[in-house]
Image (cartoon, helix red, strand yellow):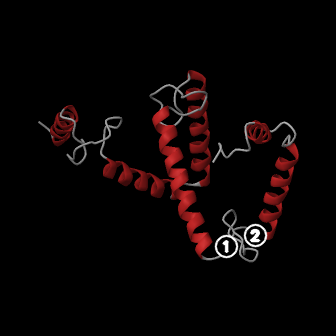
Amino acid sequence: MSNYDRDKERRELLKSSGLCPKCGRIIYDKNYVTCEICRAKNAEENKDRYKNLSEHKKEEYKKNKRLKYEKLLKSGLCVICGKKPQYNGYVRCQSCYIKSKQKSEHWKAKVRKGFKELNLCIICGEATVDGKSYCSKHLKEKQDTLAETRKKINRKNHIWKQLDNETFKNGGGNNGL
């Protein structure tokens, strides 16, 4: 028996036992064949390999990736994992959607916290206006958006106005105290 056959047999045995076929660790996420550590190592190796490609090969890689994306999109499968159906009109399955959302929120919170500590705009990282969390550009945008939103509020028939009217009709809201 050759080394290749022996290694292949070992990998199949580990895989059938629910263990990572590369390192033999327990796989906690059953949606994957390999453990999280091996996936991270593999991603890092792929990143390094991509950096060393020629421009022609990079263009070819991007083209093939785009074709795969379009194929998965047409077939109704998740464009990330390619295994599960898309989730509620999104291009990702539910688990990939949740993971990307958590990663995005974690990154935003981390970056915004760092920006806020350094008195930088939490959107772009520029210097902030005195005591605010935004630079002059984003503060102006935020103020304009709020002003537009306030204009759209129907103050005559607003729910708070209706509730106030009901409260004061029934004795002024103090319930006889």
In the figure, is residue 99 to the left or right of 28? right
Residue type (three-letter) at the residue carrying disc 2: Cys
> Around disc 1, counting alpha carbons within 10 Å, would you say few (fewer than 14), some (14 to 19), or many (20 or more)?
many
Task: Tell whether 37 sits left or right of 43.
Answer: left
Image coordinates of residue 29 in percent, x first then y, are 32, 40
| Tag 2 secondary structure | loop
Residue at 60% across, 64% down: 112
Q: CA distance from mark 2 to mark 1?
A: 7 Å
Q: Quadrant for the N terminus, please.
A: top left
Where is residue 129 drawn, in percent x and y?
76, 74
At 57% from the left and 64% from the top, the residue drawn is 111
State whether residue 40 is above or below residue 28: below
Q: In the displayed structure, would residue 131 be above or below residue 65?
A: below
Q: Residue extending furthest left?
A: 1
Q: Quadrant of residue 27?
A: top left
Q: Nearer the viewer, residue 98 or 166?
A: 166
- Contact? badges 2 and 1 (CB < 8 Å): yes
Residue 135's label in the rendered image is 2
Residue nearest the viewer, comparing 173 with 23: 173
Kindly state the secondary structure of the residue where label 1 is placed.
loop
Question: Residue drawn at (42%, 56%), measured in percent from left and top?
Answer: 44
Tell me the kind of residue under disc 1.
Answer: Leu
Total numbered labels placed on residues in the image: 2
Image coordinates for residue 159, horizontal then vertical, percent: 76, 37
Residue position for label 1: 120
Q: Which sits earlier in the primary sequence, circle 2 or circle 1?
A: 1
Residue 136 spot, x, y in % from top left: 80, 69
Q: Nearer the viewer, residue 171 or 2?
A: 171
User: In the rendered view, would you say 62 is above or below 16?
Assistant: below
